[in-house]
Image (cartoon, rainbow, N blue to C red):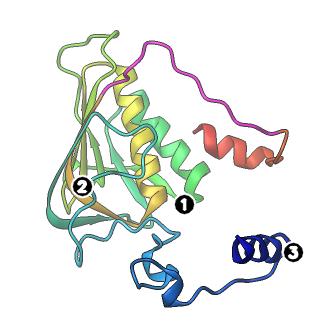
Amino acid sequence: MKSFLSFSLLCAAGAVISPSAADEPSGKPLAATRRPAVFDLDTTQAPPPRFLPVIPQPKSWVPSGRAVFTVPDVLLVSGSSEAAHALIGDWRLVRGRHAAEASAVACADVVFRPIAKMDAKDESYRIEITPARLTVSAKGPTGAYWATRTILQLFSASPRVPCGTIDDAPRYAYRGFMLDVARKPYSLEFLRRLTK
Protein backbone atom coordinates (compact mmCIF):
# COMPACT_ATOMS: atom_id res chain seq x y z
CA MET A 1 0.00 0.00 0.00
CA LYS A 2 2.85 2.36 0.83
CA SER A 3 4.55 1.88 -2.57
CA PHE A 4 1.22 2.35 -4.37
CA LEU A 5 0.58 5.58 -2.46
CA SER A 6 4.06 6.95 -3.20
CA PHE A 7 3.67 5.94 -6.87
CA SER A 8 0.32 7.76 -7.01
CA LEU A 9 1.79 10.87 -5.42
CA LEU A 10 4.69 10.90 -7.88
CA CYS A 11 2.28 10.57 -10.79
CA ALA A 12 0.10 13.36 -9.41
CA ALA A 13 3.18 15.57 -9.10
CA GLY A 14 3.98 14.99 -12.77
CA ALA A 15 7.03 12.82 -12.27
CA VAL A 16 8.08 10.57 -15.12
CA ILE A 17 8.10 6.97 -13.93
CA SER A 18 10.18 4.41 -15.79
CA PRO A 19 9.22 0.98 -14.46
CA SER A 20 11.83 -1.73 -14.54
CA ALA A 21 11.34 -5.21 -15.98
CA ALA A 22 10.93 -6.55 -12.46
CA ASP A 23 7.85 -4.37 -11.95
CA GLU A 24 5.96 -6.20 -14.71
CA PRO A 25 4.32 -9.54 -13.95
CA SER A 26 5.28 -10.87 -17.39
CA GLY A 27 8.92 -9.89 -16.93
CA LYS A 28 8.73 -7.59 -20.00
CA PRO A 29 9.18 -3.85 -19.66
CA LEU A 30 5.99 -1.81 -19.96
CA ALA A 31 7.13 -0.20 -23.19
CA ALA A 32 7.41 -3.60 -24.88
CA THR A 33 3.81 -4.52 -24.05
CA ARG A 34 2.16 -1.29 -25.20
CA ARG A 35 0.61 -0.95 -28.64
CA PRO A 36 2.15 1.65 -30.96
CA ALA A 37 0.52 5.08 -30.94
CA VAL A 38 0.19 5.18 -34.73
CA PHE A 39 -2.03 2.54 -36.30
CA ASP A 40 0.22 0.77 -38.82
CA LEU A 41 -1.58 -1.12 -41.56
CA ASP A 42 1.63 -2.31 -43.24
CA THR A 43 1.04 -6.04 -43.69
CA THR A 44 4.16 -6.79 -45.72
CA GLN A 45 6.02 -7.79 -42.55
CA ALA A 46 3.12 -8.80 -40.31
CA PRO A 47 -0.18 -10.60 -40.83
CA PRO A 48 -3.14 -8.42 -41.87
CA PRO A 49 -5.07 -6.83 -39.02
CA ARG A 50 -8.25 -8.46 -37.72
CA PHE A 51 -9.81 -5.04 -37.21
CA LEU A 52 -9.62 -1.92 -39.33
CA PRO A 53 -9.12 1.64 -38.02
CA VAL A 54 -12.70 2.53 -38.99
CA ILE A 55 -15.54 3.73 -36.78
CA PRO A 56 -17.84 1.88 -36.68
CA GLN A 57 -16.24 -1.44 -37.58
CA PRO A 58 -17.58 -2.91 -40.82
CA LYS A 59 -19.85 -5.95 -40.64
CA SER A 60 -17.32 -8.05 -42.54
CA TRP A 61 -13.60 -7.66 -43.23
CA VAL A 62 -11.85 -10.49 -45.08
CA PRO A 63 -8.13 -9.86 -45.68
CA SER A 64 -6.53 -11.41 -48.75
CA GLY A 65 -2.92 -12.09 -47.87
CA ARG A 66 -0.12 -9.65 -47.11
CA ALA A 67 -0.45 -7.40 -50.16
CA VAL A 68 -1.16 -3.70 -49.61
CA PHE A 69 -2.59 -0.78 -51.53
CA THR A 70 -0.34 2.26 -51.27
CA VAL A 71 -2.22 5.55 -51.02
CA PRO A 72 -1.02 7.83 -53.84
CA ASP A 73 -0.14 11.52 -53.56
CA VAL A 74 -2.77 12.37 -56.19
CA LEU A 75 -5.92 10.29 -55.87
CA LEU A 76 -7.60 9.38 -59.18
CA VAL A 77 -11.28 8.48 -58.88
CA SER A 78 -13.35 6.84 -61.62
CA GLY A 79 -17.12 7.21 -61.63
CA SER A 80 -19.63 9.94 -62.22
CA SER A 81 -21.72 9.34 -59.10
CA GLU A 82 -22.28 11.88 -56.35
CA ALA A 83 -20.22 9.67 -54.04
CA ALA A 84 -17.22 9.86 -56.38
CA HIS A 85 -17.44 13.66 -56.42
CA ALA A 86 -17.85 13.70 -52.63
CA LEU A 87 -14.69 11.61 -52.23
CA ILE A 88 -12.73 13.96 -54.48
CA GLY A 89 -13.87 17.06 -52.57
CA ASP A 90 -13.46 15.56 -49.11
CA TRP A 91 -10.04 14.11 -49.97
CA ARG A 92 -8.83 17.67 -50.47
CA LEU A 93 -10.41 18.81 -47.20
CA VAL A 94 -9.34 15.88 -45.02
CA ARG A 95 -5.93 15.08 -46.49
CA GLY A 96 -5.01 18.44 -48.01
CA ARG A 97 -3.94 16.69 -51.22
CA HIS A 98 -5.13 16.79 -54.78
CA ALA A 99 -7.75 14.41 -56.19
CA ALA A 100 -9.22 14.26 -59.67
CA GLU A 101 -11.43 12.21 -61.94
CA ALA A 102 -9.56 9.47 -63.76
CA SER A 103 -9.68 9.50 -67.55
CA ALA A 104 -10.05 5.70 -67.63
CA VAL A 105 -10.84 2.92 -65.15
CA ALA A 106 -7.45 1.31 -65.77
CA CYS A 107 -5.56 4.27 -64.29
CA ALA A 108 -7.96 4.96 -61.38
CA ASP A 109 -7.08 4.41 -57.72
CA VAL A 110 -10.73 4.23 -56.63
CA VAL A 111 -13.42 2.89 -58.96
CA PHE A 112 -17.15 3.32 -58.32
CA ARG A 113 -19.09 0.66 -60.19
CA PRO A 114 -22.35 1.86 -61.75
CA ILE A 115 -25.43 0.95 -59.71
CA ALA A 116 -27.21 -1.78 -61.68
CA LYS A 117 -30.40 -2.16 -59.60
CA MET A 118 -31.20 1.08 -57.84
CA ASP A 119 -32.53 0.68 -54.31
CA ALA A 120 -32.53 4.01 -52.49
CA LYS A 121 -33.30 2.37 -49.13
CA ASP A 122 -30.39 -0.08 -49.30
CA GLU A 123 -27.35 1.52 -47.62
CA SER A 124 -25.01 -1.47 -47.97
CA TYR A 125 -21.72 -1.36 -49.86
CA ARG A 126 -18.68 -3.45 -50.71
CA ILE A 127 -15.09 -2.29 -51.08
CA GLU A 128 -12.63 -4.64 -52.77
CA ILE A 129 -9.04 -3.62 -52.07
CA THR A 130 -6.28 -4.87 -54.40
CA PRO A 131 -2.70 -3.60 -54.81
CA ALA A 132 -3.83 -1.69 -57.93
CA ARG A 133 -7.09 -0.06 -56.77
CA LEU A 134 -10.18 0.03 -54.58
CA THR A 135 -13.47 -0.95 -56.22
CA VAL A 136 -16.72 0.23 -54.65
CA SER A 137 -20.05 -1.52 -55.28
CA ALA A 138 -23.33 -0.33 -53.80
CA LYS A 139 -27.05 -0.77 -54.45
CA GLY A 140 -27.90 2.84 -53.76
CA PRO A 141 -26.29 6.29 -53.63
CA THR A 142 -26.32 6.35 -49.82
CA GLY A 143 -24.36 3.09 -49.65
CA ALA A 144 -21.78 4.49 -52.08
CA TYR A 145 -21.48 7.59 -49.90
CA TRP A 146 -20.92 5.47 -46.76
CA ALA A 147 -18.15 3.68 -48.65
CA THR A 148 -16.39 7.01 -49.17
CA ARG A 149 -16.42 7.60 -45.40
CA THR A 150 -14.74 4.24 -44.86
CA ILE A 151 -12.15 4.97 -47.54
CA LEU A 152 -11.31 8.35 -46.01
CA GLN A 153 -10.81 6.77 -42.58
CA LEU A 154 -8.61 4.00 -44.01
CA PHE A 155 -6.46 6.45 -45.98
CA SER A 156 -6.14 8.79 -42.99
CA ALA A 157 -4.95 5.97 -40.71
CA SER A 158 -2.04 4.77 -42.84
CA PRO A 159 -0.52 5.26 -46.30
CA ARG A 160 -0.59 1.47 -46.76
CA VAL A 161 -3.97 -0.28 -46.66
CA PRO A 162 -4.16 -4.10 -46.49
CA CYS A 163 -5.86 -5.84 -49.39
CA GLY A 164 -9.15 -7.60 -48.80
CA THR A 165 -12.92 -7.16 -48.98
CA ILE A 166 -15.10 -4.97 -46.77
CA ASP A 167 -18.86 -5.61 -46.67
CA ASP A 168 -20.85 -3.18 -44.61
CA ALA A 169 -24.26 -1.66 -44.00
CA PRO A 170 -25.54 0.54 -41.18
CA ARG A 171 -26.68 -1.47 -38.18
CA TYR A 172 -29.32 1.07 -37.15
CA ALA A 173 -31.74 3.23 -39.08
CA TYR A 174 -30.89 6.25 -36.93
CA ARG A 175 -27.36 6.94 -35.82
CA GLY A 176 -25.81 9.61 -33.67
CA PHE A 177 -22.48 10.94 -32.51
CA MET A 178 -21.57 12.98 -29.44
CA LEU A 179 -18.41 14.99 -28.89
CA ASP A 180 -17.81 16.51 -25.47
CA VAL A 181 -16.47 20.00 -26.11
CA ALA A 182 -16.98 21.24 -22.55
CA ARG A 183 -13.84 19.60 -21.16
CA LYS A 184 -11.67 19.93 -24.25
CA PRO A 185 -12.36 22.61 -26.83
CA TYR A 186 -11.77 21.70 -30.49
CA SER A 187 -11.04 23.96 -33.42
CA LEU A 188 -13.63 24.45 -36.13
CA GLU A 189 -11.22 22.93 -38.67
CA PHE A 190 -10.94 19.77 -36.55
CA LEU A 191 -14.73 19.49 -36.34
CA ARG A 192 -15.05 19.87 -40.14
CA ARG A 193 -12.51 17.08 -40.72
CA LEU A 194 -14.15 14.86 -38.08
CA THR A 195 -17.61 15.10 -39.60
CA LYS A 196 -16.35 14.22 -43.06
The quarter of the rendered structure image containing the C terminus is: top right
Q: Please tell me whether residue 67 belongs to the stretch shown in magenta.
A: no
Q: Please tell me whether residue 180 belongs to the stretch shown in magenta.
A: yes
Mark 2 residue crowding within 10 angstroms, few (<14) / some (14–19) / many (20+)? many
Mark in front: 3 vs 1: 3
Q: Residue at x 70, y 36 (%)?
A: 179
Give the number of the disc on residue 97. 1
Q: Which residues are magenta?
A: 169-181
Q: Position of residue 87 (x, y in %)?
A: 46, 42
> Mark 1 and 2 residues: CB-CB less than 8 Å, in contact?
no
Q: Which residue, given by chain and number where applicable, does mark 2 sit on?
A: 133
Mark 3 residue crowding within 10 angstroms, few (<14) / some (14–19) / many (20+)? few
Relative horizontal placement of residue 157, taking residue 115 as reference (left or right): right
Relative horizontal placement of residue 165, taking residue 168 as reference (left or right): left
Q: Which residue occupies the foreground of this view, 37 or 13?
A: 13
Q: Is residue 175 above or below residue 35?
A: above
The kind of residue tagged 3 is Ala
In this view, the residue farthest toward the front is 1
Counting residues from the N terminus, which is met first, the one under dot 3 or under dot 2?
3
The kind of residue tagged 1 is Arg
Mark 1 residue crowding within 10 angstroms, few (<14) / some (14–19) / many (20+)? some
Counting residues from the N terminus, which is met first, the one under dot 1 or under dot 2?
1
